[in-house]
Amino acid sequence: MVQAFSSFEEHWIEICNDIRDDTLSSRIKSPKMRKAVLDIISPSPDLASKLESACHELQVVEWFGLIPKLWPNAKYVYSIMTGSMQPYLKKLTHCANGLPLVSADYGSTDSWIGVNVDPSLPPEDVTFAVVLSFSYFEFIPLHRHEKNFSSGADDFTEDKPIPLSKIKVGQEYEVVLTTLTGMHFS
């Protein structure tokens, strides 16, 4: 979502022109994509003017509140905002301007891992419950050594994998999952 908003911030003038003039940016190279879009759009000068006006206002405030400004009926923003997506949270919060950010589930490329036990909490405070029917889960206990300041990396010693029933609160783990088709991921 953040990448889409950033792209919109960069290309909004061109988008407004396309909406106004029933055109499509030359940056869209795929003939199939061009045809599909051009087959369903029609000129909309009023919409283009409204969007242009909103974008001028948003530009002045560095796009703060982009989501409620462009989608005034939005009630919340639903996305994965934890783990590897956490670096995008600051930008998403900026765009949301107070709309609740809901991070209801946690997953990996090949399997869901868990669900948020209280989706009303901000993403920084969520707790996920592992759903055991998604995959088979094992946890590798990580023991932190001193931070390696030359590389910036943390130095960990890993133990052997343990099942969910043996994990301890406060211990750091690397999650290893085996999908129902037998693929392993960590």
Image: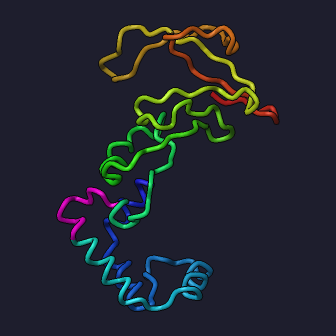
The x and y percentages for residue 105 are 58, 38
The quadrant holding residue 89 is top left
Task: Answer with left or right where residue 141 lies relative to residue 48.
Answer: right
Q: Is 148 placed above or below 25 here?
A: above
Indicate yes or no whether the magenta region holds residue 54: no
Query: 98 and 151: which one is in front?
Result: 98
The x and y percentages for residue 184 are 72, 29
Say which quadrant the C terminus sits in. top right
Query: Which residue is rendered at x = 31% and y = 84% of the image?
Result: 49
Query: Which residue is rendered at x = 57% and y = 8% of the image?
Result: 168
Q: Is 62 placed above or below 174 here?
A: below
Task: Answer with left or right where residue 137 lies relative to residue 148.
Answer: right
Q: Is 19 placed above or below 182 here?
A: below
Residue segment shown in magenta: 57-66
The quadrant holding residue 175 is top right
Say which quadrant the N terminus sits in. bottom left
Task: Answer with left or right where residue 80 lies relative to residue 95.
Answer: right
Color style of the picture: rainbow
Task: Answer with left or right where residue 177 lies relative to residue 87.
Answer: right
Query: Which residue is rendered at x = 36% and y = 9% of the image?
Result: 146
The x and y percentages for residue 147 are 35, 14
The x and y percentages for residue 79 are 50, 47
Query: 24 and 80: which one is in front?
Result: 80
- Looking at the image, the residue that sits furthest to the right is 181
- Looking at the image, the residue that sits furthest to the left is 60
